[in-house]
Image (spheres, helix red, strand yellow):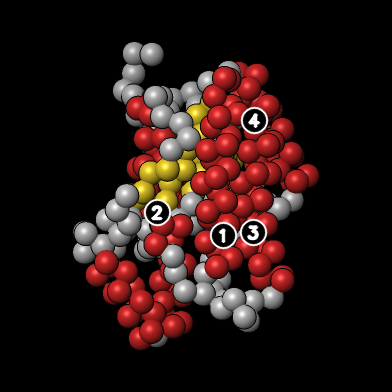
Amino acid sequence: MEDRPLCRLDGKVALITGSGGGIGEATARLFAQQGASVVVFDRDGAGAKEVASSLRATGGKAVAVTGDVRDVECIKDTVDRTDGEFGGIHILVNNAGIYPRSSLTEMSDQQWNDVLDINLKGVFNFSRAVAPQMIKRRSGKIINISSVNVHVGATNFSHYIASKSGIIGFTRALARELGDHNIHVNAITPGAVQTEAEKLLVAQQGQAGLDAVAGIVARQCLKRRILPPEVAAVCLFLASDLSDSMTGQTLNADCGNALY
């Protein structure tokens, strides 16, 4: 290994989907602090530009890309652009996702398809696009963001949990497939993370939202909210040399909600 701190990402290029806010933004900020060049990819173009601009303002290297993980041509263009500007992608964090609620009996085909297409197929789309670079280089780290709900279940979340369960299966299969090329593929199952988007959702739900959050915290071993930088720290572990012996694994970052 190089003579540098094992958590540093100097010389690495990281593409993080859904990094215009929440866990993705926190991960982009932490990776930049650790020396990585960051591609901030989000369909919220304004959010992506704001994050990338703030990273550059503090001395980091970052570009913003407005795009959708369902758009294969956009993904190809993004990968090609990153290759041209930074020299390829060393770390891919598949973080983009949506989490609408709906009961099974009221769920439309479109709602089911949207969640599966963004949360699961988006992971496939980006992994497929980036893998050839990593195979050619014979190194790479792919980190897929799943959810603790895969382990504990949740009401009115069947489409979401199906998509996040698929991510874990995909992670394990890809780890087997890409291991001969020295590519690490791992997943994280975050608990209920207190993002800005979640705060808005809870506010819209009123007391019911507050009660739901309180119920989650009550089930955790650590009775507090999980913050985006805490999940970002797990992403850093999996992106850095510290996790070089790990692939095909799922790390649970949920303050002790699911124990397994």
Q: Which mark is residue 131?
A: 4
Residue marked by disc 2: 190
> SS class of the residue under badge 4?
helix
Amino acid found under the numbered disc labelled 4: Ala
First-in-chain label (2 vs 3):
3
* Nearest-to-viewer mark from 4 and 3: 3
> SS class of the residue under badge 2?
strand
Gap between marks 4 and 1 measured at Cα: 24 Å
Measured as percent of width and height from the top left, residue 14 is found at 53, 35
| Quadrant containing the N terminus in the rendered view | top left
Q: Quadrant of residue 251?
A: top left
Q: Is disc 3 in contact with disc 1, using a CB cutoff of under 8 Å?
A: yes
Gap between marks 1 and 2 measured at Cα: 16 Å
Gap between marks 4 and 3 measured at Cα: 21 Å
Gap between marks 2 and 3 measured at Cα: 18 Å
Kindly identify the residue that appears in the image at 61 percent across and 59 percent down. 44
Measured as percent of width and height from the top left, residue 59 is found at 44, 36
* Nearest-to-viewer mark from 3 and 1: 1
Amino acid found under the numbered disc labelled 3: Leu
Q: Residues within 10 Å of mark 1 (few under 14, many from 20)?
A: some
> SS class of the residue under badge 1?
helix
First-in-chain label (4 vs 1):
4
First-in-chain label (3 vs 1):
3
Kindly identify the residue that appears in the image at 65 percent across and 44 percent down. 124
Q: Which mark is residue 116?
A: 3
Residue situated furthest front in the rendering: 260
**137 sits left or right of 7 in the view:** right
First-in-chain label (4 vs 2):
4
* Nearest-to-viewer mark from 4 and 1: 1
Q: Is residue 94 or residue 63 the one in the foreground? A: 94
